[in-house]
Image (cartoon, rainbow, N blue to C red):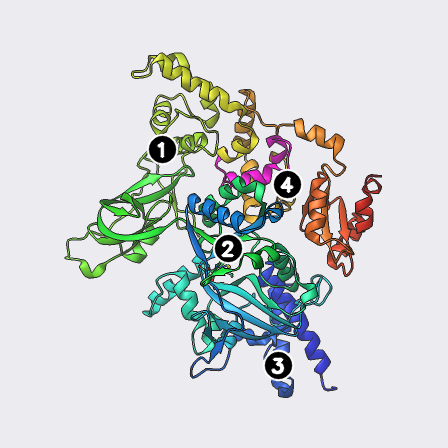
Amino acid sequence: MDHPKKHVENLRKTVSHHQYRYYVLDDPEISDAEFDSLFRRLQSLEEQYPDLIDENSPTVRVGGGIAARFEKVRHQVPVLSLANAFGEEDLHRWRDRLLRLLPEEEHARLSYVVEPKFDGLTVVLQFENGRFSLGATRGDGEVGENITPNLRTVHQLPLQIPVSQNGSHPEEQPPRRLVVRGEVYVEEEDFQQFNQAQVEKGERTYANPRNFAAGSLRLLDSGISAERPLKLWTYHIVAQDEVEDTAISHWDALNRLRSWGFPVCEESRRFKDNEWEELIKFVSSWHELRARLPYDLDGMVVKVDLLAQQDQLGFTGKDPRWAVAFKTGGEEATTKLLDIGVKVGRTGAITPNATLAPVPIGGVTVQAATLHNADYIEELDIRIGDVVLVKRAGDVIPKVLRPLKELRDGSELPYRMPTHCPSCSELLVRPPEEVATYCVNNACPDQLVRKVEHFVSKSAMDIVGLGTKQAELFVDDGYVHTLADIYKLPWDRIEETEGYGEKRVENLRRAVEESKTQGPTRLLTALGIRFVGSVVAELVMEYFDSLNSLMDADLETLSDIEGVGPKIAEAIASYFALGPNRALVQAFADQGVELAMPNLDREEDAATLLFAGKTFVITGTLPTMSRAEAKTHIESMGGKVTGSVSSRTDFLLAGEKAGSKLTKAQQLGVQVLSEQELLQGDAVLE
Ligand code: IVH
């Protein structure tokens, strides 16, 4: 055979491409077996022809050499930190300062990007001519440690950018020199699994995913790092050399990173300054986001979007003025665990709770905390009577972090979960592969009370006057069997009930009546579908004209919604696949609860806005507009822009170097437009 240089190079590109599909996009194109055979073929050719070995070959992901110590590296650009905002007030003050510092004429252009604050270890990644050349820890911000071999084992890190060679990815060439900042992290489940295995082997465990990530990245043997489930998010272009090609906004920079094959989180959102209230709402709901993501966050980061404005704002000390970390001051304290009880949640999940000796944490007296599930108690060996470490982060439920075993005196008692539901006495079940125990009795009174509590809560139907006490009463008295019964309450009988005067009943009746017009977005939130809180409900209902049409949407349509991942789409689809849930929605309709989105604007839009109801996808480099500008243009004319081409795409706006999206659009017969055609507008709707 000829010297197989070309063959090895092609094989590397193919293997890198499939690693990217698998690890970054979570969307593999070939089977694991097929991938393994390509990978092994590359490995064996590299063994056979050692002169072809390349330190950035995808085979380095398995790690190798052992270092004696880590070299120090001086960062070319100091690695800055972030100032914190604890609560909304601090955020308002941060914005006030921006408005003070930026000249008046800049105010209209002010916009923000909000993204998760990943709880991992900062890394600084350097690329020369697209090749990953150096990776370092943050260190003291000036000097870090060279951990390149360990970072090469992280599968999401592109070793050669652009990653993909078959036209499906690169839409822009990378600069000659590029420095990117990111966070290496470990998912909660991988962390638990690792610790469990360590316990079984009698070896050391880590306190939390963050320590685990940090420890694993700083192992001198990169072969061991390679076995750790390390993952990466990137979120910042620190430096790049092609000045004329610099993105004008942070949002563009994130898109550019994506187009080169970097892992960039899809949960980020952009807000104009006049959408400040929505920004606050989004940021304040970060616990919702945290709960549905498989990895931990320690807040959200709010950044000024335009890079020119970032430059104008500059720094104070180590913190940029243009960015701020929003947290809800988490604090910890120790106290005595007095007792353990269980609570039935609205999904039927049985959660053990700790009753604590009252202890002040972050200005609030804490007397109860969650213990998650039976495994958590068992793994941490938490016993009644233990002194425990408790953490409270903002308005989330405080949690018991661990017992202080060294303080035991022998009187502590191990805990056993009940076998029957404390509310309805049914036998509890634990589905295989799940850590939670459930009461599966649909008529369980406690479950129903929790559902009602959620239904009437502020971000859902907001029915003032219907609290836990009333919910318990209505369920106990048999007035409420399903959520729709809230709209059929026998007011006369309730008025006769002790303590319910005419006035109170009248107020409550009116609040219930008025809630019928809250609209489908709140109703969707109120249904309590897994992962669907108020923010997700809003994203979803932007795409449907009523709850009925959402109910009939298929999985593909749901997955196409920007900001809705496969997990959420699946949760919504499977909720509405069930007969009783569909019947519940019908029962609301029968009671006069509004299911349709207000159609005033829509009708007007349809008449006046050219692209109303049309879905666009943008690809390639446009002659004059940035993609962000094109998106804004389309949206201003009533259209929607989504990320991937499907049978529901109306138009593909394609520029130069359009890749696989163009091919797919052509296959599906989706109309392809140029920028000029888009701007002409009318041509589009022929
Ligand atoms: S931006 C100049 N964005 O949080 C750029 N940082 O508490 C400043 N972090 O050291 C950083 N997620 O390691 C930024 N989406 C994100 C982040 C993020 C996590 C880390 C970062 C920083 C620390 C500050």
The answer to whether mark 3 and mark 4 are in CB contact below 8 A is no
In the rendered structure, the answer to whether residue 577 lies left or right of residue 185 reads: right
> Dot 3 corresponds to which residue?
54
Numbered tag placed on residue 446 in the rendering: 1
Q: Residues within 10 Å of mark 2 (few under 14, many from 20)?
A: many
Q: Earlier in the sequence, mark 3 or mark 4?
A: 3
Ligand 1 neighbours mark 1 (CB distance < 8 Å): no
Amino acid at dot 2: Ala
In the rendered structure, the answer to whether residue 675 lies left or right of residue 183 reads: right
Q: How far apart are marks 3 and 2 (CA)?
A: 39 Å
The location of residue 345, given as percent across then percent down, is 38, 39
Residue 542 painted magenta: yes
Q: Earlier in the sequence, mark 3 or mark 2?
A: 3
Residue 234 painted magenta: no
Range of the magenta residues? 527-550
Numbered tag placed on residue 323 in the rendering: 2
Q: Earlier in the sequence, mark 1 or mark 4?
A: 1
Residue 503 or residue 78, whichever sits in front = 78
Q: Nearer the viewer, mark 3 or mark 1?
A: 3
Q: Which of marks 3 and 2 is in front?
A: 2
SS at badge 1: helix
Q: In which quarter of the image is residue 156?
A: bottom right
Q: How crowded is mark 3: few (under 14 residues within 10 Å), some or many (20 or more)?
A: few
The answer to whether mark 3 and mark 2 are in CB contact below 8 A is no
